[in-house]
Image (tube, rainbow, N blue to C red):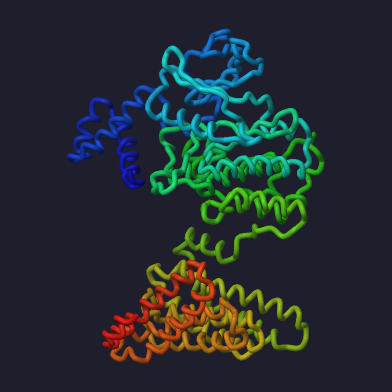
Amino acid sequence: MTSERWKQIEALFEQTLELPETERGKFLEKRCNGDEELRREVESLLQSHARAGTFIDKRSLFLSDEEGEATGAAAAAGELIGPYRVLREIGRGGMGTVYLAERADQQYEKQVAIKLIKPGMDTDAVLRHFRNERQILASFDHPNIARLFDGGTTEDGLPYFVMEYVEGLPINEYCTNHELSLVDRLKLFREVCAAVSYAHRHTVIHRDIKMSNILVTSEGIPKLLDFGIAKILTPGAGAEALMTMTSLRPMTPEYASPEQIRGEAVTTASDVYSLGVVLYELLTGRSPYRFTSRAPHDVERAITEQEPTRPSTATGLHRNQHSELSNRKLLRGDLDNILLMALRKEPARRYQTVDQFAEDIRRHLESRPVRARKDTIGYRARKFVRRNKVAVAASLLILVSLIGGLIATAWQAHRATVQKALAERRFNDVRQLAHSVLFDYHDAIKNLPGATRVRERLVKDALIYLDSLAGEATGDPALQRELAAAYERVGDVRGEAFGASLGDRAGATDSYRKALTIREALVAAAPRDVQNRRDLAVISRKIGNQFLDTADPAPGLGYLRKSLSLYSELATEQPMRAELQQDLAEAYTALGNGLEANGDESAVLEQ
């Protein structure tokens, strides 16, 4: 089943669920329109829903552990489950109940925990989750993950499994009771990361990491529990293998990633996010978000749209906590950035592995530079523009004019001999602002109605700025690279051959050639620099492409051959870099297109 098919089934199931039972059959007949497989899938979900009561009511997504307890007859103390005698109930969740037990045949005296499916909850979906969890635990052997000992089926046909009994406290309570310092909390958390990383290396995503699923023993050893909704990622599985069963599984949303809340595909980055929430609360005593209520739409909006509060401004631990934890200076800087990187809305912008997350914490503890950085001005600008498109489109023309004036003023100050350090600092600030407008604001407004006038003015002012700067860039490779990239960008906006542009093909080629001249100088100064050569290959190909659909494509062939030659050298020198091999393939394609446009059919066959 593809992810698109599942979304279709899920949407139709939820629509049908809102109708009275007497109207569902006619509704499905109309909506399925002869698709019997679709109807069977939806009816199967409806049957599971009817058997499980409110188990898959979407509102249960937003219940706490206590509120989400399902009904079901509990095993009494002294009752036997296989060869084990129940001592007492120690936990209850959506699918099953956990009991403290001991061997009834006295083969050993160690106490164990038994997880048993609740009566009435043995639907196909629940049994699949239960077997999945048992399979996962059976494959694990890690000191920070509760171990599986045994499994079986009761006389009533209900499956159970026996696991290590972890006598401990949730990690937040342990830290509070033992008054752990910030450093000790970070070290303890890294042990939790080791357990999650182990699971990921065994192709398992936990998907339910939260305080109550991390218990710390009296010896200070954290144990990761409850793989009840974990997902095994089988090699070669398609997108559907990553799909969450959000609508079919209660969850505590405070620790769920935005993609889980939205019912989208999850990856290991989802566990990174949940770990980020756990660490945030361990260090600040508060949630990253301010929920206005427990209503589903408020919780969902906060998690998917609200930016988390900066940790150093959110500290709110009780007065009896270790004094170190109330010191915002300890969180400001690296820890702020580490936590906010783990909590980013977009999975691709978080730490891509738990090991990266844990490594940054280690580097912080050792006072070394960390991977995490603040969001860039450009990124924040794009987010702002998406939220305020109309206002930005109207005001950007004024902003461009102001930047033009600022650039002129800053440039004069830059060249003055007095207050040189201050002038250079101001010039660099304005240069960064101009770069953000050219690269970030332009992308955000280019498709808005009425944006053409703003884009034309942006190009005009950008060229004035770049041409004034070009004469001073000699001998400054960093500034030369920035200039070349800006000229290339202006060329794209003016009239890139295969992109959305202002249609000024000649102007674009002129800007590209200015970038080419700078990049040729950079390669001449550092002939072995890979990035310089790659940048030169890119701009050469762009100039060559400008001639493809003209009456005379021949002038572009020299640029396309130059691009191919550079890419070929790079791919030969570094054959293991896939992106360089891809670049080479695209260069062959571009040259082939150029030769074909020029009528050199025999040469095309040779490429």
Q: Residue furthest left?
A: 34
Q: Residue placed at 42% from the left, 22% from the top?
A: 121
The residue lying toward the viewer, choosing from 277 and 532, is: 532
Q: Residue furthest front?
A: 107
The residue lying toward the viewer, choosing from 526 and 602, is: 602
Q: Position of residue 571 (x, y in %)?
A: 49, 74
Q: Residue placed at 59% from the left, 79% from the top?
A: 529
The residue lying toward the viewer, choosing from 361 and 492, is: 361
Above or below: residue 373 compared with residue 188: below
User: Is residue 549 visible from the viewing direction of this image?
Assistant: no
Residue 156 sits in quarter: top left
User: Is residue 235 visible from the viewing direction of this image?
Assistant: yes
How many marks are shown on the rendered structure?
0
Rendered-image quadrant of the N terminus: top left
Residue 413 sits in quarter: bottom right
Q: Residue placed at 63% from the left, 23% from the top?
A: 165
Q: Position of residue 162 (x, y in %)?
A: 55, 22
Above or below: residue 551 compared with residue 532: below
Q: Residue furthest top?
A: 78
Q: Residue furthest right?
A: 323
Q: Position of residue 58 (x, y in %)?
A: 42, 33
Above or below: residue 374 compared with residue 326: below
Rendered-image quadrant of the C terminus: bottom left
Q: Position of residue 581 (x, y in %)?
A: 46, 71
Q: Residue placed at 53% from the left, 72% from the top?
A: 574
The residue lying toward the viewer, choosing from 486 and 98, is: 98
